[in-house]
Amino acid sequence: AGFAIGYASMGKTAIAEIQFADYIFPAFDQIVNEAAKYRYRSGNEFDVGGLTFRTPCGAVGHGGHYHSQSPEAYFAMTPGLKVVMPRSPAEAKGLLLSCIRDPNPVVFLEPKALYRTSVEEVPEGDYEIELGKADLMRAGA
């Protein structure tokens, strides 16, 4: 995490992959106290835009206690940090491209269930899905 934060602070695009979300906790301090607060601490003079942490999350039935966690709630309330989780392959591509280009650090959580169970045509070419805007699937009561 520290290397990615430093690289992004130099204006570069950094995409850090953490093998499983369960292993993100040693990097938690750097993500929430360094990356998320970088712009604020510098008085909006510096940022780590272009910093994306990718990590698979969730249970798939055989992972046990070290490969089944979903830590999104730990990050969701952190000011300065965006948390994104797609629901389909096409959404994953569009959201990931948006995360990479966002001026804020992002934790991109990939549900492991999508890796083997989701089947969908993914458009070729470049496209983004707007971050922070809900995709309303069904109106509530």
Image (cartoon, rainbow, N blue to C red):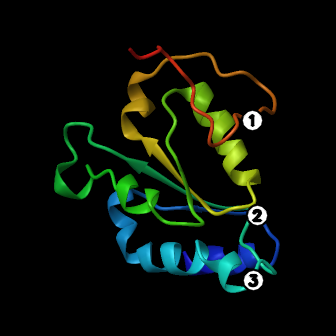
For the C terminus, give its image quadrant: top left
Please give the label number shown on residue 71. none
Q: Is 82 situated left or right of 13 in this image? A: left
| Extreme-front residue of the structure | 141
Residue at 68%, 81% in the rendered image: 6
Q: Is 65 situated left or right of 81 in this image? A: left
Cα separation between marks 1 and 2: 16 Å
**9 versus 85 height, above or below:** below
Corner quadrant of residue 44: bottom right
Please give the label number shown on residue 13. 2
Cα separation between marks 1 and 3: 29 Å
List x then y, in percent, for residue 2.
57, 81
Name the element at disc 1: loop
Say which residue label 3 marks. 43
List x then y, in percent, for residue 92.
58, 35
Seen from the viewer's position, the closer of residues 99 and 14 is 99
Q: In the rendered structure, which disc, 3 or 2, sits on the residue that comes first in sequence?
A: 2
Residue at 44%, 33% in the rendered image: 115
Residue at 43%, 48% in the rendered image: 56
Cα separation between marks 3 and 2: 21 Å
Q: In the rendered structure, which disc, 1 or 2, sits on the residue that comes first in sequence?
A: 2
List x then y, in percent, for residue 37.
60, 77
Q: Amino acid at mark 2?
A: Thr
Q: Amino acid at mark 1?
A: Glu
Q: Amino acid at mark 3?
A: Gly
**14 versus 40 height, above or below:** above
Say which residue label 1 marks. 128
Label 3 neighbourhood size at 10 Å, few (<14), some (14-19), many (20+)? few
List x then y, in percent, for residue 117.
39, 23
